[in-house]
Amino acid sequence: MIKEFPVGNGKIIQGDCLEALNSLPENEIVLAFTSPPYLNAINYEEHVEKLNGKKSRWERKEVSYEEYKQFLVDRFKALLRVIRPGGHNIVNISPVSWNGERTALSFHFVSWMEEIGWKFREDIIWEKPIARDRRSGVLLQHPYPGYYYPSLVAEYIFVFQKPAEKPDKENIYWFRTPEEKEDNRIDLSDYQGEKSKNVWKIRPVAPQENIHPCPFPVELADRIIQLYSYKGDTVIDIFAGSAQTNIAAEKAGRKHIGIETQIEYIEYAVRKINAEISQQALSFETTRIKKIGNRCQD
């Protein structure tokens, strides 16, 4: 059973994204950006209970790697149906520890996506400017070869594209009007800096800044949206969490769909998006008043 929460230029759907995706029309969405849940690391149901004061902590889930693979494959296959040919599916995913061992989940994930029909396009490294973690302290205690465990300060972002029947129809640029192209011209003033490279340094979200246990920053979603969609396009996040993608899409003038199972995250997200809408309205009104004042002075 799915339930919709309209907000701003879009909506958040409560329910399993597999069911929700199957209810959406095919070939209509231009961009998907998400970070899938690490089911072996975080029990989101228990995390919500902790937020509500029903638990003091949450426990890890017991999920096999094969079960997790199937969970992801089923949902990203359903996503393929609703993305427009030439549209993109961009995923933030990183290696994880599984049964006590570091697992190359992100690299396995690329193969899984290619097997179900997605075309791999780009890899981006999200470098998080944070202090070193306790892994790097091992070498401080044992300064010998074989004890190197670097701090985990980066995550992967993989760019996939839905193939089109004709190669010249794969670029979302080609079916735009001249007015659309001009209205979406990318600011190149800092392009020779970080944006021209595939390593992006963006500060992560601090725990006290969001109720979700592992949100990516709105700035990250904003950059993806600006580079891979046009104003008025629909952007979807199939594992929305606290809806950072929806917030960025609302700011950027895109339509948006988020899919999330936990009502507590959804209610928090709706408040955040409405706050963003109010801030945009205030900013617009302030600019309008300034323009009137300037005309009066002239």
Image (cartoon, rainbow, N blue to C red):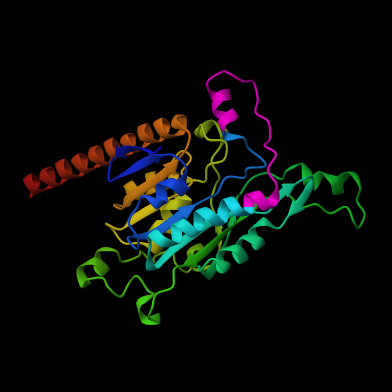
Q: Quarter holding the N terminus?
A: top left
User: Does residue 127 appear anywhere in the picture?
Assistant: no
Measuring from the top left, give residue 41's x and y in whole percent.
Answer: 66, 40
Magenta-tinted stretch: 45-68
Residue 276 counted in the magenta span: no
In this view of the protein, which residue sits in the foreground, 142 or 245? 245
Q: Say above or below: 279 vs 82.
A: above
| In this picture, residue 124 sits left or right of residue 27 | right
Residue at image point 65% right, 28% down: 58
Q: Residue furthest top?
A: 53
Which quadrant of the view contains residue 103? bottom right
**Residue at image point 44% right, 39% down:** 15
Q: Where is residue 180 in the image (x, y as percent from the top left)?
A: 24, 66
**Residue situated in front as seen by the camera: 126 or 12:** 12
- Residue 269 horizontal/vertical position (percent): 40, 36
Residue at (8%, 48%) from the top-left corner? 295
Q: Can residue 40 be seen by looking at this rendering? A: yes
Of residues 129 and 230, the one nearer the viewer is 230
| Residue visible at 32% across and 72% down in the picture | 173
